[in-house]
Amino acid sequence: MTKRAERIVIYGAGGLGREILHMLRLIHSGDESVILGFVDDGVPAGTVVNGLEVIGGMSCLSSMSEPYSVVLGMAEPGVKRKIHRELAKDPMISFPNIIHPASCVSDCAALGEGVVIAARCEVSVDVRIRDCAFLNVGTLVGHDVGIGAYSSIMSMTVVSGNVNIGEGCMIGVHSAIRPGVRIGSNCVIDMGSIVLRDIPDGAAVFGNPARRVS
């Protein structure tokens, strides 16, 4: 669900943006008028994507005459960070949390703004998810986990209890993180990795057990 019913723009008309459109249509069934269109700097204005028009690039947002919300439809942490920080300067723009109806998020979890949680995710008690983080389909998050701003956790990943994930991390499909592990900021955990030890800032790891590759 979103924080409230509002006028919504999806930033990014690629794969994740189209998946977010599907989520919004489920959430706002019978009232798609709240979904204003896609914004995409690489797709010509007027292009129709999955039945929704691209209204322009970032520059078109300055012409909005009423407050509206933006959902970031991309997973790459650095891109999310750049766009969110630029758009957050505009007092007309808010960033709603989008949670698929088929996911379960504890009432004791704390979410920042602009968080996107896809279908069949489970978020346990006392989890802290910072701004613009993304959980893809089937992600399981244990108790007392911290997930940093702009991080993206891909499908079917298991984040065990008491794990802390820093800002701007990308965690690949079917990864698993051992209880109590700390992952620094701007890390890349490649798909299928089993993380048993702490990972320092900026590291890229892969394997079972995960080992640093850069």
Image (tube, grey):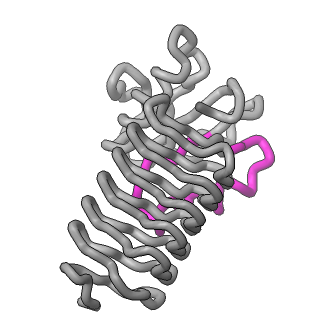
State whether residue 205 appears in this view. Answer: yes
Find residue 56 and report its horizontal and vertical position in percent: 49, 37
At 49% from the left edge and 82% from the top edge, which residue is drawn?
182
Quarter of the rendering occupied by the C terminus: bottom left
Residue 76, placed above or below residue 202: above
71 or 92: which is nearer to us? 71
69 or 108: which is nearer to us? 108
Residue 195, placed above or below residue 86: below
Residue 182, placed above or below residue 109: below
Find residue 96 and report its horizontal and vertical position in percent: 64, 41
Badge count:
0
Q: Residue 81's image quarter?
A: bottom right
115 or 127: which is nearer to us? 127
| Magenta stretch bounds | 70-94
Q: Residue 147's image quarter?
A: bottom right
At 23% from the left edge and 67% from the top edge, which residue is drawn?
191
At 70% from the left edge and 55% from the top edge, which residue is drawn?
88
At 53% from the left edge and 38% from the top edge, which residue is drawn?
99
Q: In the image, 86: left or right of 92? A: left
The answer to whether residue 19 is magenta is no
State whether residue 12 appears in this view. Answer: no
Q: In the image, 105: left or right of 169? A: right
Q: In the image, 109: left or right of 121? A: right
Quarter of the rendering occupied by the N terminus: top right
Find residue 54 and report its horizontal and vertical position in percent: 44, 32
Q: In the image, 114: left or right of 119? A: right
Find residue 183 and report its horizontal and vertical position in percent: 46, 80
